[in-house]
């Protein structure tokens, strides 16, 4: 019908095929103030992590009877210095503010969708040319602006992050191993032992949708190892600085620096993508240096290791090997 704010939404979806709400007969309250939250005064928002063909985050704001929506490829920024792309999409029914599910292959937006955060927001300005709001969510808190920039929009944080927030470092000089003997109490549980991998040291700066690799000399190696980019998808909304070794394994599953040399000097990304089909590289992770606004550089090893293992990073091009606690002589 004319003036139906959900016509575009319904036109892209098939009733009975997609589990999404409101495909047929969804109700709206267009022209009526948005429904209040449980406290009785603020409209709602949701941010959904959408593992579609390309990972992105969907921001939806309850407004004028519908859920106004933007797709944000690299997630919502935490820091004042960042502007991130936000693509306006069709209005969604209000029921979508509570939706989680798996959209079947072949359907619009196919993939897994999970709620990353939700809560309420204050609208300071909400027009076709500018949205300025303050989020009150579990993860997302603060004042943000959305505004057009060319064909798409940008989203920008307008107030400083919470006290204690530490920005992701631009560079980190990796801690280097030093030769030494076993400690006197090497058999005790107070020591942990890891394999020294024969590869190339790399620090990974990971944010939603992207990974930047830095070498031991602080040089950028991102283009040389494109397979590691998929690590961003595994981390989802998490932002992290990881430390590890880029390793090529032979047919026996053993590290082979000889094989790795066929990748080291390939600096063109297109050439690296061709070469990675012949020589696969695995990013072997052994430390976590920064996570979601907190530096772990001064944290004890056990705390860093526990936080690294909690990320459960096991994939086709990365792994987190176990450590051996105690039994130093037997291990070495």
Image (spheres, rainbow, N blue to C red):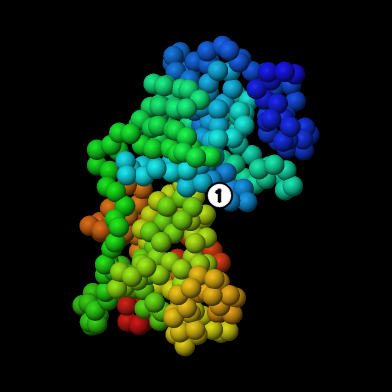
Q: Quadrant of the C terminus?
A: bottom left
Q: Is residue 173 left or right of residue 322?
A: left
Q: Which residue is mark 1?
A: 55
Q: Residue 130, position in %: x, y? A: 44, 27
The answer to which image quadrant residue 240 occupies is bottom left
Q: Quadrant of the N terminus?
A: top right
Q: Residue 102, position in %: x, y? A: 66, 43
Question: Quick one: SS at disc 1?
Answer: strand
Asked if residue 154 is positioned above or below residue 36 in the image, the reply reads below
Asked if residue 207 is positioned above or below residue 190 in the image, the reply reads above
Q: Residue at x 58, y 51 (%)?
A: 54
Packing grade of label 1 (10 A; few <14, some 14-19, many >=20) is many
In the image as oriented, which residue stretches furthest toward the bottom? 258
Asked if residue 275 is positioned above or below residue 208 in the image, the reply reads below
In the image as oriented, which residue stretches furthest toward the front? 150
Q: Residue at x 38, y 59 (%)?
A: 205
Q: Residue 328, position in %: x, y? A: 32, 77
Q: Is residue 189 left or right of residue 48?
A: left
The answer to which image quadrant residue 159 occupies is top left
Q: Can you see residue 308?
A: no
Q: Residue at x 33, y 70 (%)?
A: 219
Q: Is residue 214 left or right of residue 57?
A: left
Asked if residue 208 is positioned above or below residue 270 in the image, the reply reads above
Q: Can you see residue 173?
A: yes
Q: Residue at x 49, y 62 (%)?
A: 229
Q: Is residue 53 left or right of residue 196?
A: right
């Amino acid at each position: 019908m004319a003036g139906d704010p959900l016509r575009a939404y319904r036109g892209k979806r098939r009733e009975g095929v997609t589990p999404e709400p409101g495909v047929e007969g969804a109700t709206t309250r267009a022209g009526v103030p948005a429904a209040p939250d449980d406290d009785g005064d603020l409209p709602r928002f949701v941010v959904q992590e959408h593992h579609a063909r390309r990972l992105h985050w969907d921001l939806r704001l309850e407004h004028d009877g519908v859920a106004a929506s933007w797709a944000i490829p690299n997630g919502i920024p935490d820091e004042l210095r960042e502007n991130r792309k936000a693509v306006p999409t069709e209005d969604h029914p209000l029921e979508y503010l509570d939706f989680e599910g798996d959209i079947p292959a072949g359907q619009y937006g196919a993939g897994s969708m999970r709620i990353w955060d939700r809560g309420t927001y204050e609208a300071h300005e909400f027009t076709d040319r500018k949205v300025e709001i303050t989020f009150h969510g579990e993860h997302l808190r603060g004042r943000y602006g959305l505004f057009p920039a060319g064909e798409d929009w940008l989203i920008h944080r307008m107030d400083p992050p919470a006290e204690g927030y530490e920005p992701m470092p631009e560079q980190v000089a990796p801690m280097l191993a030093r030769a030494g003997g076993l400690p006197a109490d090497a058999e005790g549980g107070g020591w942990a032992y890891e394999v020294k991998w024969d590869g190339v040291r790399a620090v990974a700066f990971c944010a939603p949708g992207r990974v930047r690799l830095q070498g031991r000399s602080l040089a950028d190696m991102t283009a040389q190892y494109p397979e590691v980019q998929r690590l961003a998808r595994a981390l989802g909304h998490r932002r992290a600085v990881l430390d590890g070794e880029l390793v090529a394994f032979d047919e026996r599953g053993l590290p082979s620096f000889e094989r790795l040399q066929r990748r080291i000097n390939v600096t063109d990304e297109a050439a690296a993508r061709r070469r990675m089909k012949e020589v696969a590289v695995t990013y072997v992770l052994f430390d976590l240096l920064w996570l979601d606004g907190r530096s772990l550089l001064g944290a004890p090893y056990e705390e860093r290791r526990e936080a690294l293992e909690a990320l459960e990073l096991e994939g086709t091009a990365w792994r987190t090997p176990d450590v051996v606690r105690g039994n130093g002589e037997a291990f070495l």
